[in-house]
Amino acid sequence: MKKLLVLLMTLLCCATAFAADADTKTDKQQGVNWEISMMPKPSAEEQEAARWSIVVENNVGVYAYDMDSLTFSKVTNGVADKNIISVLTKTVFTEKNMLKKLDEQFKDKLAKKEKVQYCEILMTFNLQDKTYGVEAMDVYGSKKTLLSHQVKDLKFVPIPEGSFAKAMLEICQQAVAADAQAAGK
């Protein structure tokens, strides 16, 4: 009987030790890494490219906008004015004569073997009046060198038919309609 009691006490002590050890192991272990994928993670360049949505391509260049940058820019008393929308746009220049002129204009700021590549423009649209204005414009070289930064007084002008600004106005109108539809649900 004495041997049975010692055996039971030993088993009880071992079970307690195993339970305590199991408790500490779960705290130290990390969950399963669910990032395992057949697809490699996108590079910084690929992430930057995915940020832009192409709107128009013509002989001057490729025009795009940053899909996450559409914002209601005028807020009064905590309420956004859904007629005034700002958006960051990008023009990648492709026309050779224009690129030559731009390279000449910015030659003092370009690094060795660098050329003017694109500009980013912060545009603001008044949907009700169908006008737009440019708040800021940055010109970049092929090595992402900032060549020019201009902040402008916001002056609204009519949107020309068939222009990039007209295409962006339509995108802004669609965004407002989608926002209104989402708010109504």
Image: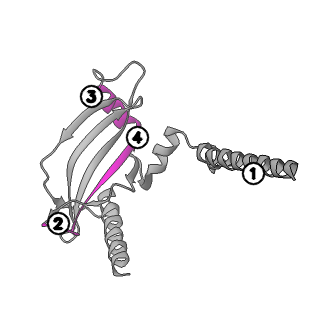
Question: Which residue lies under the disc numbered 4?
Answer: 95
In the depicted structure, whether residue 36 falls above or below residue 71: above
From the viewer's perspective, is residue 89 above or below residue 158? above
Q: Is residue 148 magenta?
A: no
Is disc 4 in contact with disc 1, using a CB cutoff of under 8 Å? no
Residue 42 versus residue 101 in the image, above or below: below
Identify which amino acid the numbered label 2 is placed on. Answer: Gly
Mark 1 = which residue? 12
For marks 4 and 2, give the one nearer the viewer. 2
Quarter the C terminus occupies: bottom left
Q: Which mark is residue 39?
A: none
The Cα atoms of the two marked residues, 4 and 3, are separated by 15 Å
Crowdedness of circle 3 by 10 Å Cα count: few (<14), some, many (20+)? few
Residue, disc 2: 78
User: Going 49% across and 39% down the picture, which residue do you hit?
Assistant: 44
Q: Residue furthest front?
A: 2
Q: Secondary structure at mark 3?
A: helix
- Residue depicted at x 43% and y 21%: 113
Residue 17: percent from left, percent from top: 70, 45
Q: Residues within 10 Å of mark 4 (few under 14, many from 20)?
A: few
Give the magenta part as a residue range: 77-106
